[in-house]
Structure formats: C-alpha cells, structure tokens
Image: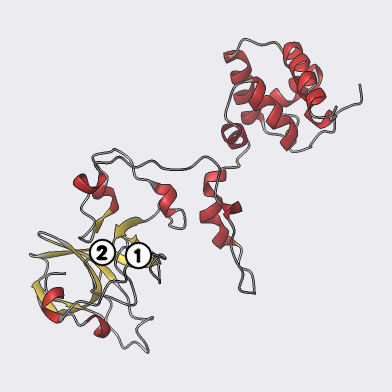
C-alpha cells in the first residue's frame, strides 16, 4: 500500500478531539484503517481517502493535519458531520459568507452560491406571521426571543459576534430609499452617543437605532438640549420628530451595515411610498 501523503501543520487539540470521536464509536485505529480502505476502493481506489493505523495515531498525537480527503473518510467512519470535523482544525464553513468581506477584489463581480454552506436551509414555522410582527422596526434578538435563537444564516454578512442586529419594519419608510423597509441592519452598541458635525452627504451622516418607549426607529439624529430629534430621509415624506431624551428614548447604537433588497421580487407588487400622514407613526 503506498504511503499516504501527510500534511505538516500540527494540531494537538484537534487530534484529541478526533480521538474522542473514534472512542465514541468504539473503534480501534486498525479498525479505522480497514474501513478507510473500503472507502478508498469505492472512490476508484483513490488512496487519498485511505488512513493507515500509524498515520491516524500520529494525527491524534498532534503531529499532522489530515487532508480534506482523509477528513471526509473520518467523517463517514465516525458518523460525524464533515463541518464539525473541519471545525476541529479551525475551519468554520458557517463563517464563509461573513468572512468574504475580509478579501476585497478590485473588480465588480457576481458572488455565487458557493459561499453558502450546504444544508443550512431554515424552515420557518407557520406561526411566524402571528408571533413576529414584521411591519414594525425591532431588534432581531427580541423578535425571535421566543425561539431562543436567531436565524443567523439570513444575516451572515453581519458581524453578530460584536454587534446587535435590527430589522426595519415593512411599513417603516423613515430612511427610504437609503434603507428600505424589510432590511436588516448591523448596530454597534458602543457608538451610542449622537455625533454632531457637518456632513458632506447623506451617506457620511451617522444613522442611529433608537428605542422609544413603545417602538424602535432607525434614523438620523440630533440633540437639542434634552430633546432628541429624529430626522427622516427627505424622499420618505416623513416628518421630523422630537422626543425627550433620555426619558423617552435610548440610543441602542449606530448603524454600521445594512443588508437589503433594492428591487421587488418578480411577481410581487411594488410598494408605494406612503404619504406624510402614513409615516408619522414610523
């Protein structure tokens, strides 16, 4: 049998976790060797899938990092998710979509479905429309707190580890068209003080997510003494509002990113911009 190709990056912790998976299914290293041979034969006798007894011992002792083929064999043998085993070695495929922004390409291009991890389809309960009010702006964590978790695969471009996430209600046109209804926004809670200054354009002006006593609003803000002024986008036809600060409002944080549609799906009816009277409650 040819000697399998070995990688050279050691990972003691990953080796311990692999060994734990092997012990969980009560297999010896020689049993793994035998099973991996069957896999290699099924793969047109591709020896990249083969795992020898001695090589597996070295991996568990942190001397080598397996190739993707051997990790695949181990996932089959241990009846363990391939994503989980890759995670032992510091590769989390669920972070792929979010971490795409770490690499900026110079030219405009399409991003295909290859950045989406497989098997991450979310099935929403039929009661969603009853339990979650999509018309109003809200914090995502509160919208889904009854579930105990947030469907984060919808929000993989957001840095949820360091920021909050807000949802712009489908009836909230406060910053339309800059931020469209139905958008998700990333909120940096550390930036919870209104900045004053002159802004060259609407894109440079800070946007804040504000909690009122009975609602949320996403808007530009100004402070005038003990009053917080909520400023809508002029195209939205909304009205400027004033609330007492901080007795009637808390600044959740500054909006640092947005995920939104800029066109209606084919077959759906486009939504008209509401009149000034319609937006007074947003």
On the image, which quarter does residue 217 sit in? bottom left
> Relative to 198, is 177 above or below?
above
Whichever of callouts 2 and 1 sits on the residue coming sooner in the sequence is: 2
Q: Nearer the viewer, residue 40 or 188?
A: 40
> Relative to 218, is 123 above or below?
above
Contact between marks 2 and 1 (CB within 8 A): the answer is no
- Say left or right for 57 vs 119: right
Helix, strand or loop for disc 1: loop
Q: Residue at x 32, y 76 (%)?
A: 206
Q: Nearer the viewer, residue 25 or 247?
A: 25
Assess disc 1: are there few (<14), some (14-19) or many (≥20) residues with their C-alpha within 10 Å of its C-alpha: few
Per the model, the C-alpha gap separating discs 2 and 1 is 14 Å
> Relative to 273, is 122 above or below?
above
Q: Residue at x 61, y 13 (%)?
A: 23
- Per the image, the residue denoted by label 2 is 170
Residue 62 x, y percent position in the rendering: 70, 28
- Per the image, the residue denoted by label 1 is 268
Q: Is the C terminus in the top left, top right, bottom left or bottom right quadrant?
A: bottom left
């Amino acid at each position: 049998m040819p000697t399998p190709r070995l990688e050279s990056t050691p990972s003691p912790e990953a080796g311990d976790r692999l060994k734990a998976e092997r012990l969980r299914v009560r297999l010896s290293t020689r049993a793994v060797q035998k099973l991996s041979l069957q896999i290699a034969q099924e793969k047109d006798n591709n020896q990249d899938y083969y795992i020898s007894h001695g090589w597996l011992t070295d991996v568990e002792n942190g001397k080598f990092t397996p190739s993707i083929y051997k990790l695949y064999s181990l996932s089959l043998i241990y009846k363990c998710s391939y994503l989980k085993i890759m995670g032992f070695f510091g590769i989390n495929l669920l972070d792929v979509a979010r971490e795409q922004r770490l690499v900026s390409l110079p030219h405009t291009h399409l991003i295909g479905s290859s950045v989406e991890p497989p098997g991450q389809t979310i099935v929403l309960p039929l009661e969603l429309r009853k339990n979650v009010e999509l018309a109003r702006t809200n914090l995502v964590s509160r919208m889904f707190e009854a579930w105990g978790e947030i469907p984060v695969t919808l929000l993989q471009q957001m840095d949820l580890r360091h920021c909050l996430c807000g949802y712009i209600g489908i009836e909230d046109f406060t910053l339309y068209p800059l931020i469209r209804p139905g958008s998700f926004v990333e909120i940096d809670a550390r930036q919870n003080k209104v900045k004053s200054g002159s802004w060259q354009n609407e894109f440079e002006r800070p946007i804040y997510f504000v909690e009122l006593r009975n609602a949320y609003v996403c808007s530009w803000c100004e402070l005038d003494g003990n009053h917080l002024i909520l400023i809508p986008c002029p195209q939205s036809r909304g009205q400027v509002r004033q609330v007492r600060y901080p007795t009637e409002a808390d600044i959740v944080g500054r909006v640092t990113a947005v995920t939104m549609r800029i066109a209606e799906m084919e077959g759906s009816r486009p939504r008209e911009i509401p009149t000034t009277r319609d937006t007074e409650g947003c």
